[in-house]
Image (spheres, rainbow, N blue to C red):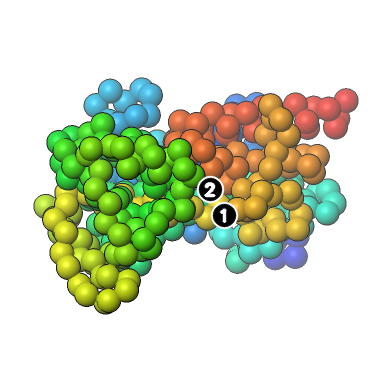
Amino acid sequence: MSDSTAATPMHHKVIILGSGPAGLTAAVYTARASLAPMLLHGPLAGGQLTTTTDVENFPGFPEGVMGPELMQRMEQQAVRFGTKVVVDTVVKADLSKRPFTLIGQSGRYTCDSLIIATGAAPKYTGAKNERDLLGYGVSTCATCDGAFFRNKVIAVVGGGDSACEEASFLTRFASKLYLIHRRDQLRASKIMQDRVFSNPKIEMVWNKKPIAVEGSKKDGVTALVLEDTKTGEVSTLPTDALFVAIGHTPNSQLFAEQLDMDENGYIKHEPDSTATKIPGVFVCGDVQDHVFRQAVTAAGTGCMAAIGAERWLESQHA
């Protein structure tokens, strides 16, 4: 297993695609199993946690830890055990035969086993300053960040089950919560709608969409600028936080028509396993999880994928 040349692809027993908690945990486990894995960074090194400030719910950090620091530590741990980290973005994957082939923007790679940990990207409203204030009052994860806004006014944008679930959860912390939807009725299931409508802390804001987030990194979010979707009228809604709950897009496009996916593009795996329908290909983290989407659950599935890959490789050489 030598380094690549311009004409020869780099070959490794295991390649891990993705550098979030799932991918880095898979790297730690496969490296400790003496599989000398290679991990390919995607376009966002460290995954979604690099856009998170304080992480208070990852075990082992009683005082909390900054998202980028947590990911840096995980990468250092993976490298310590022998993971080779390569910064490249894969643009094409061929899983039709082994070794599997990955074509990046700056190199070609082959592997006997592939662990997919490409994550998912939250959808945003496109409001001005929304991305600039991510981690400073703007969030896409109620479970991650809700506790930072105890006794504060919170706004949630969305109209589906996820938005209703996040709004209901956030009322544990909020003094008041606005649920903002661009239409005049929710898309959520009836049981979720009933839960929202019966909650005294939640006030519905119909036919509105955020067009700007007011505030700063120093002061956090102070208000939302809303546009009426029917009249175009602009108004301002004071709030201390904005939670965007309009869905996620799994980063699975590379594997379209090669792996089984659900209707939303999340990669399917075998029951009680991280194995996909292609032997030797495993999946972990948010690219296969549309339910929990937590750093610790992603890390757990990364461990599962690594052990699955190790056992599968052993079976191939039996």
Position of residue 47 measured from the top left corner of the image (x, y, whole percent): 45, 48
On the question of residue 206 being in view, the answer is yes
Q: Amino acid at mark 1?
A: Asn
Disc number for residue 57: none
In the rendered image, is residue 68 in sight?
no
Q: Nearer the viewer, residue 66 or 30?
A: 66
Report the residue at 22% width, 75% height from top: 233
Question: Residue 73: percent from the left, percent from the top?
Answer: 40, 36
Tell which of 171 and 230 is nearer to you. Answer: 230
Quadrant containing the C terminus is: top right
Q: From the image, which quarter does the N terminus lie in?
A: top right
Residue count near mark 2 (Cα–Cα under 10 Å), binned few <14, some 14–19, many ≥20: many
Amino acid at the residue labelled 2:
Gly
Q: Could you say which quadrant of the image residue 91 lies in?
A: bottom right
Q: Residue at x 17, y 49 (%)?
A: 240
The spot of residue 205 in percent (x, y) is 27, 56
Residue 241 image point, x, y percent:
22, 49
List the single residue furthest toward the left.
Answer: 219
Q: Compared with residue 255, is residue 282 higher up or lower down, i.e. above or below?
A: above
Q: Alpha carbon of mark 1 to alpha carbon of mark 2: how far?
A: 6 Å
Residue at mark 1: 251
Nearest to N terminus: mark 1 or mark 2: 2
Q: Residues within 10 Å of mark 1 (few under 14, many from 20)?
A: many
Q: Is residue 117 left or right of residue 148?
A: right
Q: Residue furthest right?
A: 318
Q: Secondary structure at mark 1?
A: loop
Q: Pointer 2: what residue?
A: 119
Q: Residue at x 69, y 49 (%)?
A: 261
- Confirm or deny contact between disc 1 and disc 2 (CB under 8 A): yes
Which residue is drawn at the image coordinates 18% and 35% (left, top)?
150
263 or 194, which lies in front? 194
Number of numbered discs overlaid on the protein picture = 2
